[in-house]
Image (cartoon, helix red, strand yellow):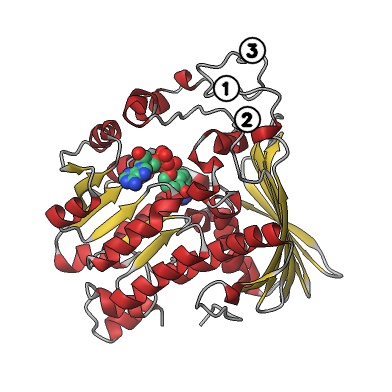
Amino acid sequence: MNRRSFLRANGIAAGSMIAYSALGSTASVLGNMAKDQKKKIRYAMVGCGHRGTGTWGKEVVKGGYKDVVEFVGFCDTNPGRLKFALRETQTDCPVFSDFDEMIKQTRPDVIMITTPDGTHDHFIIKTLEAGVDVITEKPMTTDENKCQAIIDAQNRTGRKVTVTFNYRYSPHRAKIYELLRSGEIGDITSVDFNWYLDVYHGADYFRRWHGYRKNSGSLLVHKATHHFDLLNWWIASEPKEVFAYGALEVYGKNGPFRGKNCRSCSHKSDCQFYFDVTKDKRLMDLYVENEHHDGYFRDGCVYREDIDIFDKMAVQIKYMNDVQVSYSLTTYSPYEGYRIAFNGTKGRLEAWIKERQPWEELENDDVLQLTTSFGKTRLIRVSPKPGEHGGGDPLLIERVFKGGTDTLRQEAGVREGAMSILIGIAARNSIDTGKPVKIESLTSLKPKESTII
Ligand SMILES: NC(=O)c1ccc[n+]([C@@H]2O[C@H](COP(=O)([O-])OP(=O)(O)OC[C@H]3O[C@@H](n4cnc5c(N)ncnc54)[C@H](O)[C@@H]3O)[C@@H](O)[C@H]2O)c1
């Protein structure tokens, strides 16, 4: 029996958040609320930047969810982006610079948190304390103390937190999950996982707020939270111990010259990382038009001397069920994508997923290769769905607002949000100290051997 049918069978009102949260379930309760109470979900948002106004704003409107969701308030420290959010969502809801005021005046059912990562804890805890449910963008937060404070706040309030791990929803990743559960490669014993961000997308993290640990927790948290969450989900266990290396060797202080931002830079013609933001209308409207409010440059210099995150990272993870993982993240690769291989007692499942490359790619599908030991190999082709992140975003939005049976365990709450960031936080601490870090030393959560009930 899945959680949804458990609710039905036990006559627990779908809108009863405390009962539902106690079961650890996540997103689809919002869909139930709309259906059962025949009223729209009162939905407020803090952080009206790229992700907030796009995926959780315009795409919600475009996806036809306006009969389920009512935008009741937007909050941002930048008044220009608040205006942009209203335009993008064709909404005229009230806007706020003060988060407490937004909660007080709009009485939302749920608040979407799409501010920079290092601020999530502040908004998650305030929302829970106000008796309101949370949907937060990944990473849930950026360090172990903030993580513990979120765990405590959820325990105290019994409210529900959904962490939006869109990567779980891409069709080829769901297929990997199914193939691993089928047992064809036997028990998973180890995983080789290498993620390559290219010189365009990778560099972009060093242009923006992400370049500072205090904002992003480093890319071991901001970016790798996606990858560690996929591992936790695919392996169906929780991490036990982490050891890591990392360094900053290309961006930041390593550059031969630097400026404040690309538009004002005297090295435009010499710099391979020169980025002309004026060619992108959305970025102009969202950031450049609003620079005068907060001084934030979307085209910041990738060679700023105070950048304090790593640009190459290697992490070893040991899981509670003894699976060993070798993971790496490179941020200046000539092409973008990832390679993964699951080694099992009866075979191997692998993939090289190319997201952008300077050669013509003939294959449109994502191709998985499954080879059984002493046996045969077969290719499994999975067509990406339309939409961002290999079609993951529209499927996630649908799950959040309309519900559905969580057959593949794609929904995620505080525990899943914590287990993914704790690997990145442990890795960061390990790089700083040169020592392995036990996950159980970071928060009150005790990692489990199996996450399948
Ligand atoms: N799941 C994904 O694939 C995905 C993709 C992109 C971003 N994200 C996540 O979404 C979040 C937002 O990222 P983004 O790219 O939209 O960033 P962004 O810089 O475009 O937007 C952040 C917004 O928050 C506002 N803000 C900053 N501090 C604030 C505060 N204290 N109070 C109110 N507003 C504040 C800024 O003015 C800005 O409008 C991040 O947590 C990021 O990790 C997730």
What x and y, as percent, mark residue 426?
62, 64
Between 202 and 375, the residue placed more toward the observer is 202
| Residue that lies at the very extreme toward the bottom in this rendered image | 10
Q: Amino acid at mark 3?
A: Ser
Q: Label 2 near label 1: C-beta < 8 Å?
A: no
Q: Amino acid at mark 2?
A: Tyr
Q: Amino acid at mark 1?
A: Gly
Of mark 3 and mark 2, the one earlier in the sequence is 3
| Residue appearing at x 51%, y 46% in the figure | 389
What x and y, as percent, mark residue 147?
46, 66
Residue beneath disc 2: 303
Callout 1: few (<14), some (14-19), or many (20+) C-alpha neighbours within 10 Å?
A: some
Residue beneath disc 1: 259
Q: Which mark is residue 189?
A: none
Q: Would you say residue 54 is visible in this rendering?
A: no
What x and y, as percent, mark residue 259?
57, 22
Q: Is residue 441 above or below residue 402?
A: below
Q: CA distance from mark 1 to mark 2?
A: 8 Å
Image quarter where ligand 1 lies? top left
Foreground disc of the pair 3, 2: 2
| Residue appearing at x 60%, y 15% in the figure | 268
Q: Indicate if the residue with disc 2 has its beta carbon within 8 Å of ligand 1.
A: no
Residue beneath disc 3: 269
Q: CA distance from mark 1 to mark 3?
A: 13 Å
Horizontal side of 201 relative to 335 (left or right) equals left
Foreground disc of the pair 1, 3: 1
Horizontal side of 184 relative to 62 (left or right) equals right
